[in-house]
Image (cartoon, rainbow, N blue to C red):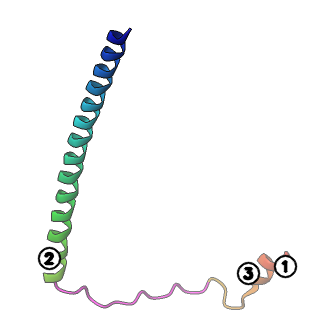
Amino acid sequence: MNDGFGEQVARFRAEVASAITQARRASAEARETSAAFRRDTQRLAAKAATAPPPEQQRPTPPPPDDDDFSQDQILLHGG
């Protein structure tokens, strides 16, 4: 009866060890991905810091559709 229990404990320990190995691999992969993103972000930030500023242009407002605002009455009051 104890032999079956020992086998179960050994199987459990093997499964735990396998899960820990997988978690360590996933964690290492996540660290590598994060480091790559960090490098890319630093590179882009440096590029943006050395780039000339964009021209300061304000967008021109669109012309009004209707100078007498009759559209407002039609849309808001239905008549």
Q: Which residue is mark 1?
A: 77
Identified by mark 2, the residue type is Ala
* Mark 3 crowd level (few <14, some 14–19, many ≥20, 10 Å Cα): some
Question: Residue 54: x and y, percent?
Answer: 25, 85
| Residue 19 against residue 26 in the figure, above or below | above
Please check the rendered image and state whether residue 38 is part of the magenta-colored stretch, yes or no: no
Q: Which residue is mark 2?
A: 46
Residue at the (17%, 70%) spot, across then down: 42
* Label 3, label 1: how far apart the Cα atoms are: 10 Å
Labels 2, 1: front one: 2
Front in this rendered view, residue 33 or 3? 3
- Which quadrant would residue 1 be assigned to in this image? top left
Identified by mark 1, the residue type is His
Front in this rendered view, residue 56 or 40? 40
Residue at the (85%, 75%) spot, across then down: 78
* Residue with the most extreme front position: 2
- How many numbered marks, from 0 up? 3
Question: Residue 36: x and y, percent?
Answer: 17, 57
Q: For the C terminus, give its image quadrant.
A: bottom right
* Label 2, label 1: how far apart the Cα atoms are: 55 Å
Name the chief secondary structure element in magenta: loop
Residue at the (22%, 42%) spot, across then down: 24
